[in-house]
Amino acid sequence: MSDIILALRKATKLYAGVPAIENVDFELRRGEIHALVGENGAGKSTLTKVMAGVVTLTTGTMQVDGVEAAPRTPLEARHLGIAMVFQENSLVPTMTVAQNLFLGQELFYNRLRGIYIAAQQFLQSLNFDVTPTATVGLLGAAKKQMVEIARAVLHEAKVIIFDEPTATLTPEEKKYFFDLVRDLKRRGVSIVFISHALEEALILADRITILRDGKHVVTDDARNFDRARIVQAMVGRDLSNTLYGTRKTTVRPAGARVLTVQNLKMAPMVQNNSLSVFAGQITGVFGLVGAGRTETFKVVAGILKRDFFHGGEVILHGKPVRYRVPAPAVRAGIAYVTEDRKVEGFFETMSVARNIYLGLLAKLPGGRFFLSRREADKVGSTWVDKLKVRATGNDMKVVELSGGNQQKVVIAKSLVQDPDLIIFDEPTRGVDVGAIVEIHELIQRLADEGKAVVVISSYLPEIMALSDRILVSRQGKVVEEFSALEATEEKIMYAAVH
Amino acid sequence: MISALKDFADRFLGRGDATITVPSFDGALKPNQILEKAETVGQFEAPEDLATDGKVLYIADGAAILRLDAAAVTEVRRFDRAISALCCLPDGGIAAALDGREVQVFATPSASSPRTTIADPSMNAINALSPGAQGTLIATDGSTARPYGQWVYDLMERGRTGKVLSLDIASGRVRPIASGLSYAFGACAAGDAVFVSESWRHRMVAIAQDGSQRAVLDNLPVYPSRLSPAASGGFWLTAFAARTQLIEFVLRENAYRRRMMAEIDPEYWIAPKLKSGRSFLEPMQGAHIKTMGVVKPWAPPRSYGLVIRLNADGLPLCAAHSRVDGVNHGVVAAVEMAGSLYAIAKGPGRVLRAPLAMIERELRA
């Protein structure tokens, strides 16, 4: 039996004549953990989608256990023993966790109770704290990711591909995930995982492959890499000093109080939460998943509603506000840049320009009977240039952009509204290092211009690199505040956990 | 009818005017232990106010004016009534409000007799004095209904009878600048306007010469009190107690409050206090004051101590706290002198000294 379980030779995939991957050679050894690293648009997702049968190769070959294979659907790939856990999850939101786990394995007669018991036992064996009877749509991003992972493990795949598996996980959950991956490896399962967190690749992987612009750059043992070498190979330049590298030595002074949240309640996620946000500052909000950060700011932005009885107060520019829908919040100058861009951030089959124009329309009072295509193009072009969105044209569909550029479109859609308060929820999740630098620069610029900026992030280096003041959230309320000058990772994490 | 229905709905749902919330101590008001770490300069019987001419610190302690220099305390003069406010004048004089009803101005702190005595019948609870323009004094009168010592009654009765007065030192004439304030407690000239703390509305307002008012600092989590100028520009604003949801709730419940005032010893009212933790009869302000035997500093406090540093526009820059687990509560006055901040913690009867360098160091820590 060959040591190579999965191989791709001269793999090329063209989209409308443009290569997403070109002549890529890739080998996955039996029982190894193989990290796939590269900027957004480098071709990682395409390569893994080929393996998982989501797309087929234009030219080149793929071999599974030495036998040529060309899975045309994920089901065919699963029959070959290849399962994929997608970055943007592929669960059915209206079904329960257990139903999602056993989706595709239905019998003629399905006993729901039996499914729940089996799911409960299985999730417990993985140390995953997810209720099998919970509806998936009501779960947070991390829990959805857990269900995705559990489903792949349940299918007893020989090869499991993880696309950004840890982006939504808390440090504790990450530790469980790493243990799980190592356990899978011990059982002989081969793992391919894509991660933008380079430390994870260095810690977890046996070998690392780096792609750039759809081409294979290097594959080597993980022990031969360090962070600087990976980043240099990924982007072709040294970024180590610009990304989370420097510690803040000054912070911006607080301007006027823009937002005050007082005793906000939204059971069960937000519990008597109080905080303030000031103009001309970046307020970082850190917390583990379930700390109620996103929910608090979604209430502020009118996306969620606070408790009906004694739900607390949101005060914007000194006046109490209560938004039932996001439109009045947008008109009042609040922009919320979502953490889940694919679901909430844009219309993926619409063009870049139209998506950005939609943001502008949301700000305008009343409705518009006629829309100006010229105005949409003009607004689109302006913001594509401003944020350096890498698209072939204004009419390019957002779905065709890389993750980083999609995120820039989402940000442009909010900034076109000229808000006073901008809430970035996980602004660089699933974004490559090059785009991270650009997005961070943009956030800093907004604060310098006097805007009140909130950055919600689960990634501590990001919080520490960006924030002037850091609020730590735990169990639905802010429990601690640090100035960026006094904050350390240990202090923040301690406050978030204890 | 519609407003009555709306009021009922708001009370039922806890919305609108019936929202019972308090802002958090964050941003420039981020909690610390600076007032707890401050040096205790002295323990006094009934310290009430501080004044400085830049060289010497004067303390109003009961009916006496004390002078503090080089750690020695000497009595400068004694009155027959308690002093409710004190201030030094730019010409070297000193002014004192007695029992809230009379203001005496002396040419020097040790002068044998007052230069001017102002005893206007409209004055009832003068609680702060500050130099004004063109030989005047700015005085805040907390309440026309209750004497100064009964400030808690005024709060529980939701008093709105506070006034700001301009007292002409030469003629003794009294001119009202503003009225209808929810307990005016502290004033300071700020350019053409006067900054005034309005305790029961948790804010600081700027009152222009034409009497128009503008909120400078709004929705504070505390009950603000006296103001004094800072040496490098801006102001020091003190606060003697922190707001809690329980007190806010009681302040909305008129029948409950009336019964509480009629039947319960004021010492044990659900109301802000200058000191706490002395009796088990005191109503707790929350359930989690002690956990595992440790007083949690984020528990809702019955009493509190705070001094806020404001810039010239009235925006807070930083603050010095004595939190729920501290003792230096009931801070009613603070002045800056010779690179240090002096404050009165009326609860324990202390005068505190915190060097500005220490405050800066603590804020950076």
Image: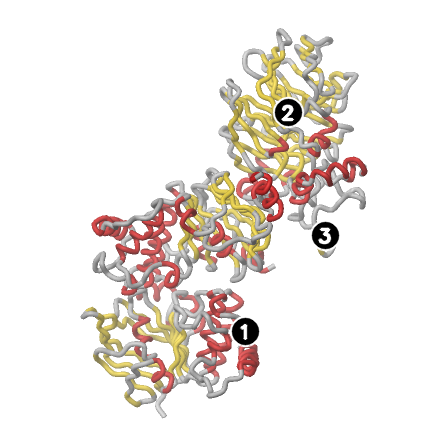
Q: Chain of mark 2?
A: B
Q: Chain of mark 3?
A: B
Circle number at residue A133: 1
Q: Chain of mark 1?
A: A
- Which residue is drawn at the image coordinates 34% and 75% (left, top)? A220
Q: Residues within 10 Å of mark 1 (few under 14, many from 20)?
A: some
The secondary structure type at the circle numbered 2 is strand
- Which residue is drawn at the image coordinates 27% and 57% (left, top)? A352
Residue B185, can we see it? no
Give the residue number, with chain letter if any, for mark 2.
B162
Q: How far from the left and from the top, in percent, is residue B169?
A: 62, 10
Q: Are marks 2 and 3 in contact (CB under 8 Å)?
A: no
**How far is the residue under mark 2 from the one under mark 3?**
37 Å
Q: Residues within 10 Å of mark 2 (few under 14, many from 20)?
A: many
Q: How far from the left and from the top, in percent, is residue A97?
A: 50, 74
Circle number at residue A467: none
The secondary structure type at the circle numbered 3 is strand
As drawn, A314 above or below B152: below
Circle number at residue B290: 3
As drawn, B120 above or below A316: above
Q: Nearer the viewer, residue A195 or A112?
A: A112
Q: How far from the left and from the top, in percent, is residue A145?
A: 46, 70
**How far is the residue under mark 1 from the one under mark 3?**
38 Å
- Which residue is drawn at the image coordinates 57% and 58% (left, top)? A267
Q: Nearer the viewer, residue A87 or A489?
A: A87
**How far is the residue under mark 2 from the one under mark 1?**
60 Å
Inspect the image, locate mark 1, and give the three-letter code of the amino acid beneath it: Thr
Inspect the image, locate mark 3, and give the three-letter code of the amino acid beneath it: Lys
Q: Nearer the viewer, residue A446 or A459?
A: A446
As drawn, A430 above or below A23: above
